[in-house]
Image (cartoon, helix red, strand yellow):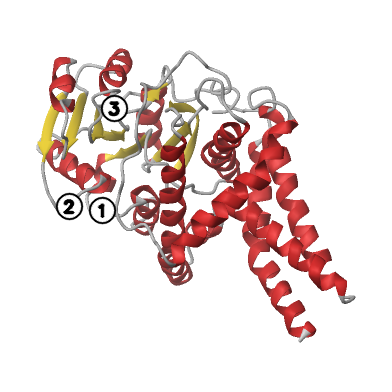
Amino acid sequence: MTLIFDILILLAVGVCVVPTLLFFVECLIGSLPSRFTNTAEDDRRPSVGILMPAHDESVVIAGTIDALKPQLCEGDRLLVVADNCSDDTADIAKRHGAEVTVREHAQKRGKGWALEHGRQVLAHDPPEVLVILDADCELSPGTLDRLAIAAMRRNAPVQSAYLMPPPANPSPKDLVSAFAVTVKNVIRPRGLARLGWPCMLSGSGMAFPWKVLADVPFAGGHIGEDYQFSAEIALAGYPATFLEGAVTRSSLPANQKAVSNQRRRWGHAHLQVMAVEIPRLLRVAWRKRDFRLLALAWEISVPPLTLLVGMWFVLVGLGLIALLWGSFWPLISAGTGFGLIIAGIAAAWWPLREDYGSWRIFLAVPKYCAMALGQYGSFWFNRESQWIKTARETPPSTSNTSPHEPNRAG
């Protein structure tokens, strides 16, 4: 019986070690000093269509549009899709100079449907590059030009660094949450870019050459439309890449219930995509001998950070139990994997240590991971299946520029 227990632990460690090793490499390379140079500054800037899905965004949309206007050029279009709104989002967007289309549908609800509707509207006079920006996000100066030029030069989707700074007077848990987002949306994609590998799309602050969207519909009502679309567009031959020096900012919700719901939706979406898209990517990667698809499958296999850390906590605990009856290999193997994940986190944290407080924030990590494990555990018996908008409290703030300057975190 003890032998079976040991074998099961070692098998679990074997399953976790591949995504953990990839996480460590991404963090190690992505935490190195920025090498951003604006090499595309002399390229022709293509025409841009900004597609902004908006569901009951009256609190933030005016600020988002006004902040975006200085980056627009003649011939650009800003289209707001007021999707199933119960407030005056559409009227506010019109007053602030945006082109607006209103969409109402009782069953087909979600960001993916709004994006597909907006794309069909823009198709009557398509831009050269389509940029997707959520209604609660702002682009740092110069980001729109960088996204448009890079998408045209690479003939592929490009993703900016998508950051969510913590609210004012953050708790340790807020800092841990914001740090986890920075690792996911900045450090790891930057590491992938430096390896020459594709990245996942983050849902906002991303650009696409119009012609690559011809045969790839948006993801409809999927709760993780950005995750699913990352796989779909890669399978169509256009894997996304990270653009260093381009930054998109939003705000981490101050309402703890909103944070919890958002984290639950993201986690369930990631697990759903892992189950469906990894086998598809591996099959096509093998058939086409396409390493980019294999690399993206590896990237999708890395679970959310809190889940990954929580899994290693559990494995180390089981290794300690095995040690009680004299079996030390489970603990050695689990401890090695746990050390690898801690080393990756430390590498990512080091260049950001001034922005996310002292090392004491990590005292909140065990409690945070325990909460996350409970949320991810509910995937098996109370799975999220519908897209839910995250509650907004205030417009996104650009006053706190650290750690979000392109030469540091972007």
Label 1 amino acid? Gly
Label 2 amino acid? Lys
Q: CA distance from mark 1 to mark 3?
A: 31 Å
Identify the residue position indicated by label 3 in the image: 46
Residue 221's disc is 1
Between circles 3 and 2, the one closer to the viewer is 2
Contact check, label 1 and label 2, Cβ < 8 Å: yes
Q: Secondary structure at mark 2?
A: loop
Q: Position of residue 212 (x, y in %)?
A: 28, 47
Residue at 62% over, 55% down: 308
Q: Secondary structure at mark 3?
A: loop
Q: CA distance from mark 1 to mark 2?
A: 7 Å
Q: Earlier in the sequence, mark 1 or mark 3?
A: 3
Residue at 64% over, 46% down: 367
Residues packed near mark 2 inside 10 Å, few (<14), some (14 to 19) or many (20 plus) = few
Contact check, label 3 and label 2, Cβ < 8 Å: no
